[in-house]
Amino acid sequence: MDKDRHKLLTTFLANMQISAFTFGGGFVIIPLMRKKFASDLGWIDEDEMLDLAAIAQSSPGPIAVNTAILIGYKVGKIPGALVSILGTVIPPFLIISLISGFYSIIRSNPYVGYVMAGTAAGVAAVVADVVVSMTIDLVKQKRIQPIIMLAAAFILIAVLDVSIVAVIILSALVGYASSVWNRRHQHDLS
C-alpha cells in the first residue's frame, strides 16, 4: 500500500475509533483527536490543532465533524476530509440506529440512567481537561492575546451572561483586527 493510501486508511480508522468511543458531544473529541493526530502521529502540531479546534467551533455544524474535516483536509486534502467525515459519522449513526430500536425499552431503566449520569461526569472531566491543557499550552508559549481573550470570553459568558454568538463574533473581529495589525506591523518592519 502506498504512503497516501496508508495515511488515508489511518485517518479513517483513527476517526472511526475516536468517534465510536466518545460520549458527551463534540468538545470531548478534541483532546482525543489532538492526542492521536498531534502527539501520536505527529501529522499536526499542537498550535495548529488549537487553531483547527477554534475554527471548527466557530463554524456551523457539529464541532466533532468540523474538526474531523479540517484535520482530514490538512492530512490528505479532499480525500482526507472525506474519509474523516465517514470515519466520524459512521459509529454514531450505527449506535443511534441500534439504540432507537430499543429506546422504549431502555428509557425507563434506572441502570441506564446511572450509566448516563456516570458518563456525564466523565464528559465534564474531559471538557475541563481540554480547557486546562489548552490554557497551559498558551501560557507556556507566552501567547498573551489568546489568554486575555479566553478570560474575557469566560467572564462575558459565565458572569455577564452575554450571548455565546455575540462572544464568537466579537472574538472573530478581534482576531481579524489583530491579524491585520500584525501584517501591517511586519510590513512596516521590512
Image: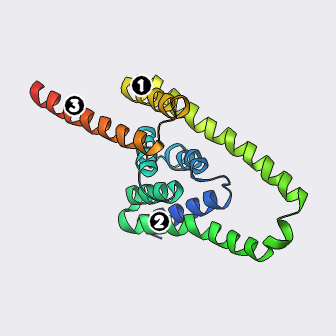
Residue drawn at point x = 37 percent, y = 67 percent: 78
Amino acid type of the residue tagged 3 in the rendering: Asn
Callout 2 environment at 10 Å: few (<14), some (14 to 19), or many (20+)? many
Please give left or right for residue 147 compared with residue 110 in the image: left
* Real-space Cα separation, disc 2 to disc 3, in angstroms: 36 Å
Q: Which dot, 2 or 1, sits closer to the camera? A: 1
Quadrant (top left/top right/bottom left/bottom right) for the C terminus: top left
Pointer 2 residue: 8
Q: What percent of the width, then of the height, locates residue 7?
A: 47, 62
Pointer 3 residue: 182
* Real-space Cα separation, disc 1 to disc 3, in angstroms: 17 Å
Please give left or right for residue 151 compared with residue 14 in the image: left
* Of the pair 162 and 66, the residue shown nearer to us: 162
Q: What percent of the width, then of the height, locates residue 106?
A: 84, 67
* Of the pair 48 and 40, the residue shown nearer to us: 48
N-term-proximal mark, 1 vs 3: 1
Q: What percent of the width, then of the height, locates residue 104?
A: 82, 72
N-term-proximal mark, 2 vs 3: 2
**Residue at the limit of the structure toward the bottom, as seen here:** 101
Residue drawn at point x = 52 percent, y = 27 percent: 136
Callout 3 environment at 10 Å: few (<14), some (14 to 19), or many (20+)? few
Up-down: is 39 above or below 14?
A: above
N-term-proximal mark, 2 vs 1: 2
Q: Which dot, 2 or 3, sits closer to the camera? A: 3
Amino acid type of the residue tagged 1 in the rendering: Ile
* Of the pair 159 and 109, the residue shown nearer to us: 159
Pointer 1 residue: 148
What is the secondary structure assignment of the residue under circle 2? helix
Q: Which dot, 1 or 3, sits closer to the camera? A: 1
Amino acid type of the residue tagged 2 in the rendering: Leu
What is the secondary structure assignment of the residue under circle 1? helix
